[in-house]
Amino acid sequence: MCTLSILRDAKNLTVTMNRDDAAARTETPPSLWPAAKSAFAAPRDMQAGGTWIGVNGHGLVACLLNRYDVAPPGRSSRGAIVVAAMEATSVENGHAILAELDHQLYAPFTCVLIDRMGASRLDWTGAAASRTDLDPIGETMLTSSSWRFDDVSAMRADLFHTLRETESDAIARIAAFHTRRDSANDAWAPMMQRPHSETKSVTQIAITDEGAEMRYWSREAAIARQLEAPDTVIRVSAPINA
């Protein structure tokens, strides 16, 4: 479960991701992780040791969404997929690295790779892997849900498009979308809450000519501050390596 948005104009790229998981599952804010080719910034899942979002010094972003296809459970943590992608220098290079992974080790997933030139997703259903290129400019929203996926996806998409029509400030509407709750039924909202799971944090990556910056809010901080004044800010090697 997660919700991801990509906002891109001629110069800047903003990626924002809500992490939805079991309420009892713990995580740590972003830090710099060592890597062979380029250190990268990522928060850490304390149960399995991996991560769901990262950005490296080449300006490559990788984001992981769970899929819920009927498939045998994976033997390896899906959080390792983002770590593997962080060795890449571009979306294309990232796909080449992910293609070399033994997908059979993992439960179904969607890994989204993003840089300033474009974005693409790799979907593993448990039976087959496929690549889909995303719109290179504008705004994109992707989501996953273990509960009533079709309904939840449709409601989040409707909210995303409604905010585009009613809020002219792109950064403000991204904040409004990712922090939206529904007092009548928070189970579908981007800032979701269910009996045993919830949106645990929001992580945002901004890439400009000056480099990459990762911003992180706990659930409570994201709601209270509407994605202003992050709890943690990590900057990654500016300027971005070619």
Image (tube, rainbow, N blue to C red):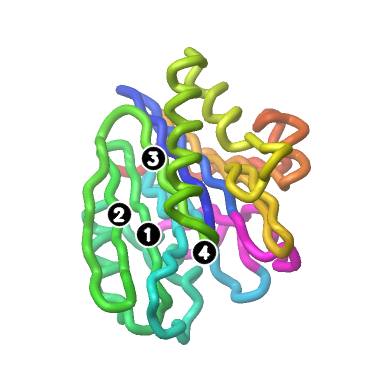
Instruction: Tell me which segment is drawn in magenta.
Output: 20-45
Measured Cα–Cα span from mark 2 to mark 3: 22 Å
| Label 2 crowd bin: few (<14), some (14–19), many (20+), radius 10 Å | many
Relative vertical location of residue 150 with respect to residue 83 in this rendering, above or below: above
At 25% across and 37% down in the image, what residue appears?
135
At 43% across and 27% down in the image, what residue appears?
161
Question: Residue 64 lies in magenta, yes or no?
Answer: no
Residue type at numbered disc 3: Ile
| N-term mark: 3 or 4 | 4
Residue type at numbered disc 4: Pro
Measured Cα–Cα span from mark 2 to mark 4: 25 Å
Q: Nearer the viewer, mark 2 or mark 3?
A: 2
Determine whether, in the image, residue 204 is placed left or right of residue 68.
right
Q: Residue 180 location in percent, x, y?
A: 63, 35
Q: Nearer the viewer, mark 3 or mark 1?
A: 1
Residue occupied by mark 4: 34
Q: Could you tell me which secondary element the residue under label 3 belongs to?
A: loop
Whether residue 211 can be seen here: no
Is the magenta region chiefly helix, strand or loop?
strand
The C terminus appears in which quarter of the rendering? top left
